[in-house]
Image: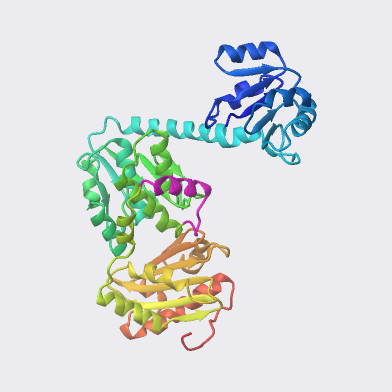
Amino acid sequence: MRPVLICPDDLLEHVVTAAAFPGERPLYLVSRASLRARLARRGDRAVAGKVTDATFLRDTLKGGRGPVVVAAPAGQLARVTAAVKEAVPDAPLLVLRDDDRPVSNATVVPLSAFGERIVQPALERATQRARAERLRAHFYDAERVLILMQDDPDPDAIASALALKTLLGRTRASAPMCTFGTITRPENVAMCKILEIEVEAIDAAALDQFDRVAMVDVQPSFLEERFERVDLVIDHHPMEQPIDARIKDVRPSYGATSTIMVEYLRAADVKIGQRLATALLYGIKSDTLGLERGGTKADLEAFTYLYLLANHNALRRIERPELSPEALDVLARGLAQRRVVQGVFFSHLGRVATVDLIPQFADFGLQAEGVQWSVVSGVVDNEVHVSVRNVGYVRSAGDVTRAAFGELGMAGGHRTMAKAVFPLRQLGRGAGDPAASGACQERIIERFVRALGGNARAPEGSPS
């Protein structure tokens, strides 16, 4: 049906006529013959008359009409809407006005909504496009670019590295995705295998082979290696130390670095193919627990955009990797040794072959009844790794983990997830004894409960 637009002045000519109305082009009811003529020259149907007169409106619209849109100066708005209701009381009515005050039996759209929903997002995209062009220009003449991730890259890092390589228009040879460590978690290994993503392990001596160094989902202070020059850092983790880089884009309010990269790609009009969309969607999903942990409006928009582009069959295969018998034994031991103290799920897995089981079990621990925190630890190569998770509406996990373990080694993270890594000997005498697993757990519980604000001595008790 043909929509009807009633505009005593030329407001709608500039605002609403640019919108796409489904079906027929709208009929304009205007108050000035000059405006009617201008609309007619453009090919629009328009009728001039007294738009505050119900008789004029009734006679003009008696041949049939669709929804009625009213935009009038504040002084005339009440009279125009009253005339519409009298002339065509059953017509759907939309009112555009300066503010969002309600109009009875009508839907109101404040003019500020055009700025909030159209102009502001467009301005943000223009800003992001300028950033993308600056970034591309900086790397344009580099023969080889190093795209570096953390030592055990997670899905967010892997997807972000792949996105940066796509944004720069690079090949594997000219911009390899690298780590100083190795990928250990089964889901991450499955991600690279199923999506055919190649991640190379390098050492610090290889840095001289590259003309530019870019870091994604990591910062120089997070790594043991030292860098003479870093060209780019894109990350969503809070800064522990000032970042010395030619270009840096760090957004701690974002739930995932993948979200930042989606904004870059869209602003630069770079096509996101199925493989990249699947990787980025999984990056956002894994770092935000499906938008339940630390997700923002930006994460939701990126997730929604990618959802229709991704391969969900591949995503299901990635999210359900196989667990080896050895991994099942470790998880069974962790369940048997669990403790719940003051709403915190604790489990010390003892010595484990790979780090990946510790954060995996920490996620699982948060599902225990009555629990707000999950703290799971394990020993790998004489280092204690502690993964911390919380429900999101309590104290920052990063702050509490730093307070509990910061003096022992590396500790920090986000509001809902954090980790600590420190030498086993820091837990005190006897900690390195394979039979002292229980003592390690008690010392971890004591430190964490104290940092959380509970008693310095954790209550004794059998496993929950």
Pinpoint residue 213: horizontal percent, then vertical percent: 30, 42
Above or below, 133 against 314 in this view is above
370 magenta-colored: no
- Going by the picture, which residue comes out furthest to the front? 63
The stretch of residues the image draws in magenta is 291-309
- Colour treatment of the image: rainbow
Q: Is residue 56 above or below residue 212?
A: above
Q: Viewed as shown, does residue 385 lie left or right of 82? A: left
Q: Is residue 92 left or right of residue 127?
A: right
Q: Residue furthest bottom?
A: 462
Foreground pick, 121 / 249:
121
At a point 35% along the width and 81% down the height, the residue shown is 332
Snapshot quadrant of residue 318: bottom left
Who's the residue at 48% across and 31% down the image?
Answer: 126
| Image coords of residue 384 (percent x, y) | 37, 71
Q: Is residue 185 left or right of residue 450?
A: left
- Quarter of the image for residue 362 reads bottom left
Determine if residue 223 is in view.
no
Where does residue 108 sit, x and y in percent of width and height? 69, 38
Of residue 92 and residue 229, the one placed in the foreground of this image is 92
Q: In this view of the protein, can residue 172 be seen by the observer? A: yes
Near-viewer residue (230 or 170): 170
Inspect the magenta stretch and tell me whether residue 299 lies in it.
yes
Quarter of the picture containing the N terminus is top right
| Number of marks in the rendered image | 0
Measured along the vertical axis of the image, is residue 14 above or below residue 134?
above
